Image (tube, helix red, strand yellow):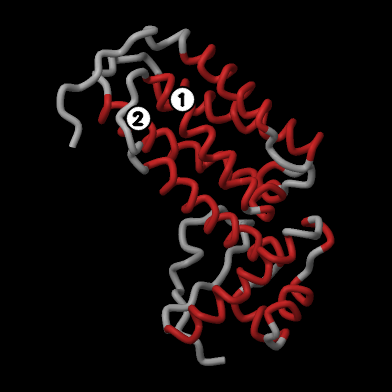
Amino acid sequence: MGEDIDENAAVDRPPKRIVARRPQRKPGQVRFRKLLDALDQLLATSNVQDIGLYQIAAKAKVPNASIYHFFPSTEAALLALAEVHHDALLELSKLPLDVPPARWQDLFRQKVTGAAEYHNSHPAALRLFLGANISVEVKSADISQYHRLVEARSQLLSHYFHVPIVPDWERRLSTYFAMIDGVFSLSYSETGYIRDDYIAEAHQAGIAYLRCYLPEILVPRDTVG
């Protein structure tokens, strides 16, 4: 009780979406993250539909009233955890490569491999984003993530190469990310993780699609800072 809650956290959201109440004071932030860590651990071994707020509270060793203070529903907790993983994946997508790529295809290959490795090392992310029981709200958040990834990938691509104007490029790149997720989901449904051969298939499919809009060779920029 008495937590300093950001009252604007749910402003401008779709009317039916129930979101987490995000604390602004340090003690509340620590407990909030503790609950999300507990949910992350539960998702490593349990299906989404088998987890409720009481299980999260018990795993985090906090009173039930405390979790209701932050999360009005399990869905709100899942959305908050999805945001954590989305932010991490976005930062991973933004990272420059250790060695500038000679070809734009190499940039996409390294990034798709990095995304797969992140998912495989975070079982909760696998279940949240690739599982068969993805909720409508989490799926909607996942689609919104494409727009952020599009911006990050476009900037990184332009950082390394002179990129021609491609009509409707944002939609093309969003489709690319959806294709990658589709292959990842297929691998997860069959094997429980993203297998190396499926990573290669995802890359091959994605590059074949992008070749419809990008030339085979892009001129590298002379200076990469």
Q: Amino acid at mark 2?
A: Ser
- Please give left or right for residue 22 compared with residue 185 in the image: left
Q: Amino acid at mark 1?
A: Leu
* Disc 2 element: helix
Q: Quadrant of the N terminus?
A: bottom right
Residue on which the image places disc 2:
154
| Residue 84 picture location, percent across and down | 53, 58
Q: Residue at x 52, y 24 (%)?
A: 176
Query: Callout 1 environment at 10 Å: few (<14), some (14 to 19), or many (20+)?
Result: many
| 98 shown above or below 164 | below
- Please give left or right for residue 62 compared with residue 146 in the image: right
| Residue 177 picture location, percent across and down | 53, 30
Q: From the viewer's side, name the closer residue of 205 and 176.
A: 205
| Residue 69 picture location, percent across and down | 61, 81
Question: Residue farthest to the front?
Answer: 99
| Residue 28 picture location, percent across and down | 50, 83
Residue on which the image places disc 1:
173
* Marks 2 and 1 close (CB-CB < 8 Å): yes
Q: Residue at x 52, y 50 (%)?
A: 86
Q: Residue at x 58, y 64 (%)?
A: 19
